[in-house]
Amino acid sequence: MKTIHILLNYCIATVWIMNGLYCKVLNLVPRHQEIVARIVNEDHSRMLTFIIGLSEIVMAVWIVTRIQSRLNAITQIIVIAVMNILEFILVPDLLLWGKFNALFAFLFILLIYYNEFYIQPKTAQS
């Protein structure tokens, strides 16, 4: 189980790195900046997208370090839920899978929860 937990941690961190670095910081997926522009402000959308991307990279580093892992998991769950609720309501036309993005977000939340609160306690007892 410990190996599965570690593998899942790296997979989850990879999702944050991909979305933060490639999609937002390097702006290789301009749709992310369009989403920010429509939700917040067109004038500062590039800067805000960049900051969001950096925050996602920090999240990935936090996941890998395992510092305060339960707080990290709860933070991830809240961030993903809030972000996806806002996008679902405000910009569903810009989402990769439209309103189905909410389903994938929910599955990702379940994975994070399962990894931290079901697998992790078992590895701590070993």
Image (cartoon, rainbow, N blue to C red):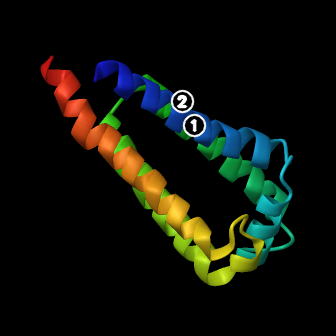
Pointer 1 local density, CA inside 10 Å: few below 14, some 14–19, many at least 20: some
Q: What is the residue that sits farthest to the bottom in this orientation?
A: 89
Is residue 51 placed above or below 43 in the rendered structure? above
Residue at 18% in and 32% down:
121
Q: Nearer the viewer, residue 51 or 117?
A: 117
* Left or right of 70, for residue 33: right
Q: Quadrant of the C terminus?
A: top left
Residue 77 x %, y %: 41, 55
Q: Residue at x 82, y 68 (%)?
A: 34
* Residue at 71% in and 68% down: 95
Residue 76, horizontal then vertical, whole percent: 45, 50
Distance (Cα) linking label 2 and label 1: 5 Å
Which dot marks residue 117? Answer: none
In the image, residue 46 sits, relative to residue 112, either above or below, namely below
Check disc 1 and give the amino acid type: Val
Answer whether labels 2 and 1 touch (C-beta < 8 Å).
yes
Residue tagged 2: 61
Query: Residue 7 vs residue 21: left or right?
Result: left
Task: Residue lying at the far left in this picture: please name it.
Answer: 125
Position of 15 with respect to 47 (left or right) is: left
- Residue 31 x, y percent position in the rendering: 82, 62
Picture mark count:
2
Name the element at disc 2: helix
Where on the picture, by quarter, is residue 70?
top left
Under circle 1, the secondary element is helix
Could you tell me residue 47's position as x and y percent? Answer: 80, 55
Tell me the residue at 60%/41% (across/down): 15
What crowding class fits label 2: few (fewer than 14 Cα within 10 Å), some (14-19), or many (20 or more)?
some
Q: Which residue is mark 1?
A: 58
Q: Vertical placement of 3 versus 33: above or below?
A: above
Report the amino acid beneath label 2. Answer: Val
Relative vertical location of residue 106 with respect to residue 29 in this rendering, above or below: below
